[in-house]
């Protein structure tokens, strides 16, 4: 080999390694950034709690029996305990990044466990729980204790008082339970619409359609739709599916059904192309063998070709689910951007991706919570990817 050829080969190898390194570094930086900013807020409570906090106003009626429980072991330096009231507070931040005072411990004999709900006079007594956020303690003879002054000040004010006029506290809030449920609804309804249509269209194009200008044009149109920006589909959803669902359902505006139909149209080209490619890789020898044994074309397609193409179809389904989870532009028009805790398929809501968009449009942007939701999305896609690969391996072994 000549020196010139060696130099050219080294140049090509160097370009290949350089481009690969840039890709790996860029992807790694994205993952590192997301996990570094979002890992602190990632816990089980984030997944099961509501986004909107519930507010409670309470007081104590009758004689007060103060706590006799000493401070528990393990309280950190930023946690302050009231021996008199049997409750400990700490200065922390909520999931929106705001400074709050959180209840970290409450004794069994604390009078804070037996409060009167001022918002609901007919309810039974209730109490503060660990994890609640205290927003104010109001007294009759002095100024209110507020989070702006810190947890230590609030505990000192409690210790110096025998009673208080009102305590205001909330649940933690900031959870993404509603967005997770909305995402699951959208995934299910979108696939229910697009998967059968996409798979059967691919079967027709690959197994039954004649090779002519019409089918070639149809394939070209499918490829063109694959590259259409999703926001254009969102405008179509707003103009077509939203009015359609408002007319024939109880919906009054953008809703999960209209969003799912919009995503279903977006997914059709993806599913058709991926399914058609999986059908093409099935060896013709299997088709010929089936026909030779007396099966007709339809039987061969659905009993021989389709089962062998199933791993590829499942890959197409995974791609579709990943597109659903990551889609935001189209859903902003077709569903809306209202973060809801009570989910209805006839109402507005947000998927996880739209929830991220909503957080990033706030002033200031909540980067930490947005990164945490991004971590959740990555974990969901990872789990789905592993699951599909395991199922695909099982089917390959079955039909080998």
Image: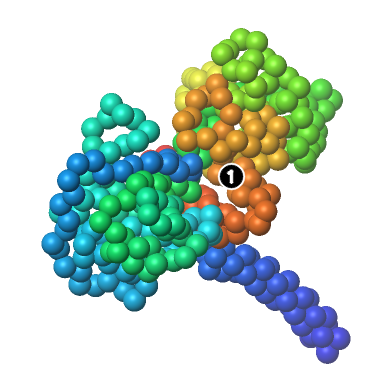
Instruction: Tell me what residue is drawn at x 23 percent, y 58 percent.
Output: 85
| Circle 1 SS class | helix
Image vertical order of residue 152 relative to residue 127, above or below: below
Q: Quadrant of residue 217?
A: top right
Q: How is the image coloured?
A: rainbow
Q: Nearer the viewer, residue 370 or 148?
A: 148
**Would residue 17 appear left or right of 345 to someone viewing this image?**
right
Graded by Cα atoms within 10 Å as few (under 14), some (14 to 19) or many (20 or more), the crowding at tag 1 reads many
Q: Is residue 111 left or right of residue 154?
A: left
Residue depicted at x 77% and y 40% = 229
According to the picture, the residue beneath numbered tag 1 turns out to be 355
Horizontal side of residue 3 vs 342, given as left or right: right
Up-down: is 319 above or below 232?
below
**Is residue 42 something one can see in this rendering?**
no
Residue at x 68%, y 21% (from the top left corner) = 242
Q: Position of residue 132 (x, y in %)?
A: 36, 51
Farthest bottom residue in view? 3
Badge count: 1
């Amino acid at each position: 080999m000549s020196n010139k050829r060696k130099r050219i080969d080294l140049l090509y190898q160097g370009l290949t390694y350089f481009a690969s390194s840039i890709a790996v570094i860029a992807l790694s930086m994205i993952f590192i950034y997301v996990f570094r900013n979002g890992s602190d807020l990632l816990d089980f409570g984030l997944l099961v709690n509501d986004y909107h906090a519930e507010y409670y106003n309470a007081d104590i009626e009758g004689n007060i029996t103060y706590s006799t429980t000493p401070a528990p072991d393990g309280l950190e330096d930023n946690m302050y305990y009231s021996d008199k009231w049997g409750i400990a507070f700490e200065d922390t931040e909520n999931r929106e990044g705001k400074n709050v005072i959180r209840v970290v411990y409450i004794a069994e004999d604390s009078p804070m466990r037996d409060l009167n709900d001022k918002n609901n006079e007919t309810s039974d007594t209730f109490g503060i729980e660990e994890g609640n956020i205290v927003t104010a303690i109001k007294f009759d003879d002095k100024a209110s204790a507020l989070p702006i002054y810190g947890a230590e000040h609030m505990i000192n004010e409690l210790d110096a008082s025998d009673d208080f006029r009102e305590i205001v506290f909330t649940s933690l809030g900031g959870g993404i339970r509603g967005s997770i449920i909305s995402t699951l609804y959208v995934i299910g309804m979108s696939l229910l619409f697009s998967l059968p249509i996409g798979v059967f269209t691919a079967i027709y194009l690959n197994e039954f359609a004649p090779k002519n200008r019409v089918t070639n044009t149809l394939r070209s149109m499918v490829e063109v739709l694959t590259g259409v920006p999703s926001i254009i589909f969102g405008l179509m959803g707003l103009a077509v599916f939203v009015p359609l669902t408002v007319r024939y359902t109880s919906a009054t505006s953008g809703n999960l059904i209209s969003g799912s139909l919009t995503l279903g149209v977006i997914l059709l080209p993806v599913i058709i192309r991926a399914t058609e490619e999986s059908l093409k890789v099935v060896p013709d020898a299997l088709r010929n063998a089936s026909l030779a044994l007396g099966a007709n074309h339809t039987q061969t397609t659905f009993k021989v070709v389709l089962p062998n193409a199933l791993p590829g179809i499942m890959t197409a389904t995974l791609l579709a689910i990943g597109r659903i989870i990551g889609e935001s532009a189209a859903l902003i028009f077709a569903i809306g951007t209202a973060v809801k805790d009570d989910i209805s398929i006839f109402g507005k809501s947000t998927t996880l991706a739209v929830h991220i968009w909503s957080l990033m449009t706030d002033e200031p942007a909540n980067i930490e919570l947005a990164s945490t939701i991004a971590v959740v999305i990555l974990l969901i896609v990872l789990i789905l990817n592993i699951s599909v690969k395991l199922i695909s391996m099982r089917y390959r072994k079955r039909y080998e």
